[in-house]
Amino acid sequence: MVTRSAPVSTRRSGAGQAAPGGGERARQILLDGEVSCAAWTAALSLSLSARPEKTCTPLWLGAVVGPSGRDTQGSVEPVHGVPYGRPVMIKTGDPRSLGVPSSEARLHFDAELQELGGGPRRRLLMVDDQPAFELSFYCGTCPLLFRRLETAREKLSLESMQERLTGPLDDPDDAGVIDAFGALLPEGEYLPLLLNVEPRLIIPGKEGDYFSGEQVTTWGIDQFWGLPEYPHTPYYRTFETAVDAAAHLYEFVVPMVPPTWNERERVEEYIALMGQGTVPTAVAISTLDVCQPALGSGDDPSVHWGLTHFLLDGHHKLEAAATAGRPVRLLSLLTLDESLAGADERARLPALRARPRSARATG
């Protein structure tokens, strides 16, 4: 059972500092460097019960920069089949406050209340008060995750925006699109990013799957199930690049419902429009989760920056673009409050997203 609870933010601060508002046990776990999910869950529960209005901060992860404090580009190689160096960042807007009270928002972030003796709390993306996706765990050391749940059944397109989004958006602030979709979101700070993406549809377990590929290389398989993580949904891969020698940025576009639910006629209409040179616009709420394994269980124990766009509008457009090999414009509203990333990491994202595409070189 999922109960609406106060928002839980997990922002990182300097090493050795106590988590703001945390209980004494939570502080000691952070300072001692105990990083297991069980320890973190216990600390989080204590912190929430002690001061539920405050935040908890996992502090054992260091900044992802070179030893000099500068960004140090790692060894990279081109992504096969994709033009290297194509510009994909159109424009970054100014951070801004958007949204309505969480109780009124169609989409919001939440966490299950901890049951006595139960397992870790799930971090959730909720749609119409139903759990739609399970997201990366709060600790920052567990693998990156977006897992579709059985109650994810709704799209969040706006009929009033359909005509405007049929073509390209040239500026994040054009035509009131941000304000229109902002009314679906919970109150908070958001960073608008306007991108061009060339989506590639990925089926979990098949070629190109992040969860059975790069993630296993870093974390290994799940120790309980003996299998890779499974997202329970097809998704799109759109971009990746090196953050530095020890970290890599991976980008995903995740549909609220699978492409098999799309109307074939509408997909064909967009394919035809794209064939005539039209570049339609999709809209997403996005998270930046920075995850680093606590134990070296994989062959490449690197830091994964996961930029995940959950589609609000554009399900037919993304499928059409992937089918036709055409670009689509994406207006991303990056939540600054609910991402598992520090302020420095969030500030670096626009520059990283403007870099050339490159795959991580391992071995």
Image (cartoon, rainbow, N blue to C red):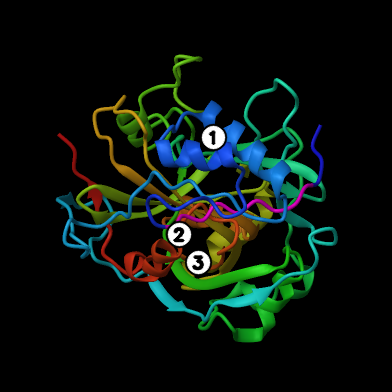
Above or below: residue 104 compared with residue 134: below
- In terms of secondary structure, where does tag 3 sit? helix
**Residues tagged 2 and 1 counted as in contact (Cβ below 8 A):** no
Question: Pointer 1: residues within 10 angstroms few (<14), some, or many (20+)?
Answer: many
Image side of residue 183 versus residue 264, left or right? right
Task: Magenta stretch: give its range.
Answer: 5-13
* Residue 276 picture location, percent across and down: 49, 71
Q: In front of the other: label 3 or label 2?
A: 2
Question: Pointer 2: residues within 10 angstroms few (<14), some, or many (20+)?
Answer: some
Q: Is residue 326 in view?
A: yes
Above or below: residue 206 compared with residue 265: above
Image side of residue 312 versus residue 129, left or right? left
Q: Which residue is denoted by mark 2 in the rendering?
A: 342
Question: Pointer 3: residues within 10 angstroms few (<14), some, or many (20+)?
Answer: many
- In terms of secondary structure, where does tag 2 sit? loop
Say which of 265 and 165 sits in front.
165
Q: Which mark is residue 11?
A: none
Q: Could you tell me how far apart the alpha carbons at marks 3 and 1 are, in whole angstroms?
A: 48 Å
* Residue 56 picture location, percent across and down: 58, 49
